[in-house]
């Protein structure tokens, strides 16, 4: 598992994908930061994180689209699957590598807010931390969705498009509930599935344990499905 | 096979089904320690499937495979520790250097041997020391294949499995790879698959022939060669009329049968000569021609290509199968 994690992390930087992701993420974060705080003379943390969440949904597939598709195309998965490493170990190794890339980008760009501290009277460090944690949690869902889709296809582009589609589906499912005002049962289900709805409880300053559990279980579910895909493929 | 050796690989009634298609249909064999065994068969016979099941890449539909006594399905992580595997296409990452790649495999296999000397040794065995800092992407096909072989050797596994190791290599590289395999056979149990009979004859002590998912022969290489050569047929080109030649040839004891094909090559007529069991008809053909002063201008074996051998062996195994069924019926 450690070997796969290390190789994967290194491959982001021996190829171009790691740089592409980092550059796009850092530049976008800087632009969004300037726009939401400096230009609008505000110490508001929330709008930055909401925009970055949407943005992550679109660029995270850069990190995950290759993960399994490329192994399948190059037939290197035969090496991984015949080495004394469990499938779970392999999937977790790949997850951690992509996640470390994402998390370091998030943490690094969040440091931008520290320059506000001397100037803003209303700035709340706890709120900033809450938002960082929320983005990291939602990111883990996105990464595991990306790995899952990547395990389904040899084609990187399909993997990326499929990932974005599923993630946007998760983000918009909450909007559907506002379209069905009358049926409370359906609204309840839709609301509880909404990735975005739970994100906003964080951004408004609540540390919601149930949301933490929700995000972690959703990530675990997709990683489990990835393991199952590989397990299944040996039989047919 | 050494009778006292423990089977390092034991395969029992292996079946692999895809829908209604059988890729493997009830295959059983054993391989002892230190053997070099060839899996021979035409494309699509089930060689790769067998190897993929042995290495834990695929699961069988039924039956079992034991590596060093460990069931690969029940305890795959333990069983895989004994295997080094070179798949049909070497599993290499083009963006890594040879040394980086081997270090990765070393970590992946949780190898306990002393890292640097071990990797250096493998590099020198497969003659990759000169290119160890080059990107795999930039290496030639032969070198890539050697990187694949090097990868299989990491951790000094007891069993090494090569799936078509010489496909796509040039003749010189083929010889090098065969020598390498022969050398590895001194310290490891080696299984290799191929569709080239000569390769098995050059390298393997024993051959398992697979056709359409079934084993049609499993014997020592020398024995199989004899089976194939018993009833050997030759094509002889003789510059003389059939009415003179055929009686002279048929008079020889070593010749079971001689026929004219009716074909002509220049002023030579083409004849087919069949050996009597266990003898070589070529000497007899020469003697017959020399005694009668027939100019003999060509003599070549026919039916030694894999296809005819398969036809032979399939016929033989069908006959045996029919015998067995008959005996089984009688026993009931």
Image (cartoon, coloured by chain):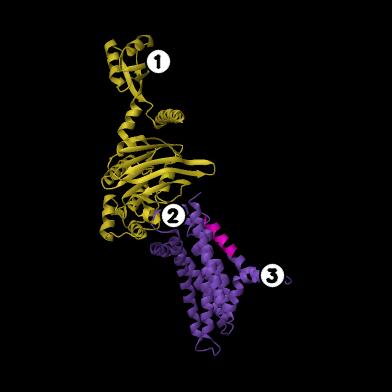
Callout 1: few (<14), some (14-19), or many (20+) C-alpha neighbours within 10 Å?
A: some
User: SS class of the residue under badge 3?
Assistant: helix
Distance from Cα at disc 3 to Cα at disc 2: 44 Å
Q: Which residue is mark 1?
A: B260
Mark 2, chain letter? A
Taking the view exactly as shown, the residue that stands out farthest to the front is B332
Residue at x 27%, y 11% (from the top left corner)? B291
**Residue B116 shows in this picture:** yes
Chain yellow in the figure, letter? B
Quadrant of the rendering where the N terminus of chain A is positioned: bottom left
Q: In the image, is residue A201 above or below residue A147?
A: below
> Residues at marks 3 and 2, common chain?
yes
Q: Secondary structure of the magenta portion, mostly?
A: helix
Residues rendered magenta in the picture: A155-166
Callout 3: few (<14), some (14-19), or many (20+) C-alpha neighbours within 10 Å?
A: few
Place of residue B126 in the rendered image (x, y in percent of width and height, measured from the top left)? 29, 49
Distance from Cα at disc 1 to Cα at disc 2: 56 Å
Chain purple in the figure, letter? A
Q: Which residue is mark 3?
A: A185
The label number, if any, that marks residue A77 in the structure image:
2
User: SS class of the residue under badge 1?
Assistant: strand
């Amino acid at each position: 598992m450690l070997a796969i994690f290390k190789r994967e992390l290194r491959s982001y930087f021996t190829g171009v994908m790691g740089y592409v992701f980092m550059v796009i993420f850092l530049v976008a974060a800087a632009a969004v930061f300037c726009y939401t705080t400096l230009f609008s003379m505000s110490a508001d943390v929330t709008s930055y994180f909401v925009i970055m969440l949407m943005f992550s949904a679109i660029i995270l597939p850069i990190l995950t689209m290759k993960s399994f598709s490329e192994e399948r195309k190059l037939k290197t998965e035969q090496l991984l699957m015949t080495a004394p490493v469990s499938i779970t170990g392999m999937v977790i190794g790949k997850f951690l590598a992509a996640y470390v890339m994402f998390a370091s980008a998030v943490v690094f760009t969040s440091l931008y807010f520290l320059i506000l501290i001397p100037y803003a009277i209303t700035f709340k460090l706890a709120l900033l931390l809450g938002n960082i944690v929320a983005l990291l949690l939602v990111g883990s869902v996105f990464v595991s969705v990306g790995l899952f889709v990547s395990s389904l296809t040899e084609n990187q582009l399909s993997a990326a498009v499929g990932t974005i589609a599923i993630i946007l589906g998760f983000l918009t499912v909450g909007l559907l509930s506002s379209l069905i005002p009358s049926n409370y049962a359906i609204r309840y289900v839709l609301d509880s599935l909404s990735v975005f709805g739970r994100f906003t409880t964080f951004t408004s300053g609540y540390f919601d344990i149930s949301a933490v559990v929700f995000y972690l279980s959703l990530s675990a579910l997709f990683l489990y499905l990835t393991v199952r895909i590989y397990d299944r493929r040996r039989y047919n | 096979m050494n009778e006292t050796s423990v089977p390092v690989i034991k395969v029992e009634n292996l079946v692999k089904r895809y829908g209604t298609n059988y890729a493997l249909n009830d295959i059983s064999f054993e391989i002892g320690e230190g053997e070099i065994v060839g899996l021979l068969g035409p494309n699509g016979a089930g060689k790769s499937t067998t190897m993929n099941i042995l290495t834990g890449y695929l699961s069988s539909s039924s039956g079992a495979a034991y590596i060093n006594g460990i069931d690969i399905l029940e305890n795959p992580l333990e069983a895989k520790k004994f295997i080094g595997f070179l798949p049909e296409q070497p599993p290499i990452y083009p963006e890594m250097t040879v040394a980086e790649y081997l270090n990765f495999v070393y970590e992946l296999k949780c190898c306990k041997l002393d890292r640097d000397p071990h990797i250096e040794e493998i590099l020198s065995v497969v003659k990759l020391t000169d290119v160890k800092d080059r990107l795999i992407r930039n290496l030639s096909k032969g070198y890539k294949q050697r990187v694949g072989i090097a990868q299989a050797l990491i951790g000094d596994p007891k069993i090494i499995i090569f799936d078509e190791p010489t496909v796509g290599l040039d003749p010189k590289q083929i010889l090098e790879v065969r020598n390498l395999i022969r050398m590895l056979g001194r310290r490891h149990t080696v299984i290799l698959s191929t569709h080239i009979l000569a390769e098995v004859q050059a390298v393997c002590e024993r051959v398992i022939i697979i056709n359409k998912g079934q084993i049609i022969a499993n014997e020592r290489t020398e024995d199989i060669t004899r089976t194939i050569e018993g009833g050997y047929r030759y094509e002889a080109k003789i510059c003389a009329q059939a009415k003179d030649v055929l009686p002279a040839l048929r008079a020889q004891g070593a010749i079971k049968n001689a026929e004219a094909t009716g074909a002509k090559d220049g002023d030579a007529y083409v004849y087919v000569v069949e050996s009597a069991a266990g003898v070589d008809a070529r000497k007899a053909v020469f003697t017959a021609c020399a005694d009668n002063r027939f100019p003999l201008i060509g003599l070549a074996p026919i039916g030694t290509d894999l296809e005819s051998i398969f036809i032979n062996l399939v016929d033989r195994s069908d006959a045996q199968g029919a015998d067995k069924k008959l005996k089984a019926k009688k026993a009931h």
